[in-house]
Amino acid sequence: MKSIVSFDLDMTLLDHKTYRIPDSAMEAIDRLRNNHYIVLATGRDMDNYFSRQFRDIVQADAIIHNNGTKITVGKQVIYETCMSKELVTSILQFADQNNLSVGITLGNNDYYTHPEQVRDRDMEVWGESNRQYKDPWELTDKNIRTLVYIGEREGAKTLEENFPALKCPLFEGVKGADIIEKRNSKAIGLQFLCDYLGTDIKDSYAFGDSMNDYEILKAAGVGIAMGNAIPALKEVADYVTENIEEDGILKACQHFHLI
C-alpha cells in the first residue's frame, strides 16, 4: 500500500532566495512517485495565479490547499469548507478600522484592506509588486476558506485576541500570517486525505518549516522539519534535516530509505 509523503511549499520545497525548487528536491519527488503518494500541504491556494507554476512543476497526486480547507485529487475537489460570511465581514471591518492589511488572493486578483502595506512588503521581500487589486469588500459575497494578514507579529496577535475562533500562525521569514479558523488545519486535511486514499496516517511523512506546519508534523507518522525551520517546529519534529538550499529534502528521503 502506498503511503503519503507531504510537502509544504514555501521554504520547504520553494527556496525564497532563488524562488525555485532545488533540483535535488525535484529529484527526490520524482524518485518517490512510484511507491508513494506525493502531496502538497500549503497555506496557499495552489490554483491561483502566483502558485500554479509550482503546482504544475511538482505534479502532486493531491493537494491540501489553504491549510486544510480545500483538498484536491488531480483536478477534483474532494473537500472544501468556508468561513461564514458574517465572520469574513467582521474580520475585514476590524482590519480596516485598525489599520491592518487583511485579505486573500483569489484566481488572478488580490483583495486586501490597506493594500499599500502589501505593496511595501512585496517590494521589501521580492523587489517588485505586480498584484491586481480589487475591492476587498467583494470578499463578503465570495466563498472564503482562509484569509491572510500582512504585517508585523503584533497585528496577528491582535487578531487572535479579538477573534477567539481564529489562529494566526506566522509566516517564516516574511512579514505576515495565515488567518485560519481553529477547526481547520493541514493535519485535519491529511487525515481526510488518508481516509480518502485508503492509507494510514501512521505511515505518512510530512515536511515543513513554519507554524502552519506544526499540527501536520505532529499528526504524521514521521514529521520532518527543515534545517531552516523555526525552533518550535524542530522541537515537535521526529527528525530535522538540512536547510532547503543544502538538499534537505533529498537527504531526509535517503535517511528514511524512502528512495
Image (tube, helix red, strand yellow):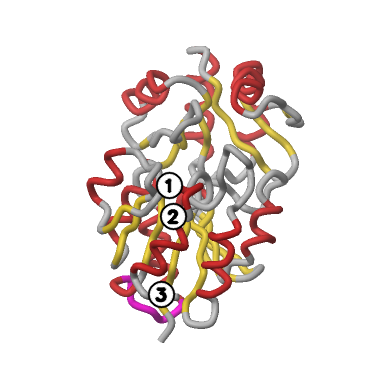
List the single residue furthest toward the bottom: 1
Dominant secondary structure, magenta: loop
The residue under the point 43% across, 41% down is: 180
Q: Are marks 1 and 2 in contact (CB under 8 Å)?
A: yes
Q: Residues within 10 Å of mark 1 (few under 14, many from 20)?
A: some
Tell me if residue 184 can be seen. no
Q: Quadrant of residue 158?
A: top left
Q: Which residue is mark 1?
A: 243
Q: Which residue is mark 3?
A: 258
Question: Is residue 93 shown above or below 50?
Answer: above
Dot 1 amino acid type: Asn
| Residue 49 percent coordinates (x, y) | 72, 46
Question: Is residue 113 shown above or below 220?
Answer: above
Q: Which residue is mark 2?
A: 248
The residue under the point 65% across, 27% down is: 136
Which structural element holds mark 1? Answer: loop
User: How far apart are the two marked residues, 3 and 2, measured between alpha carbons?
Assistant: 14 Å
Q: Residues within 10 Å of mark 3 (few under 14, many from 20)?
A: some
Which segment is the magenta one?
197-201
List the single residue furthest toward the left: 235
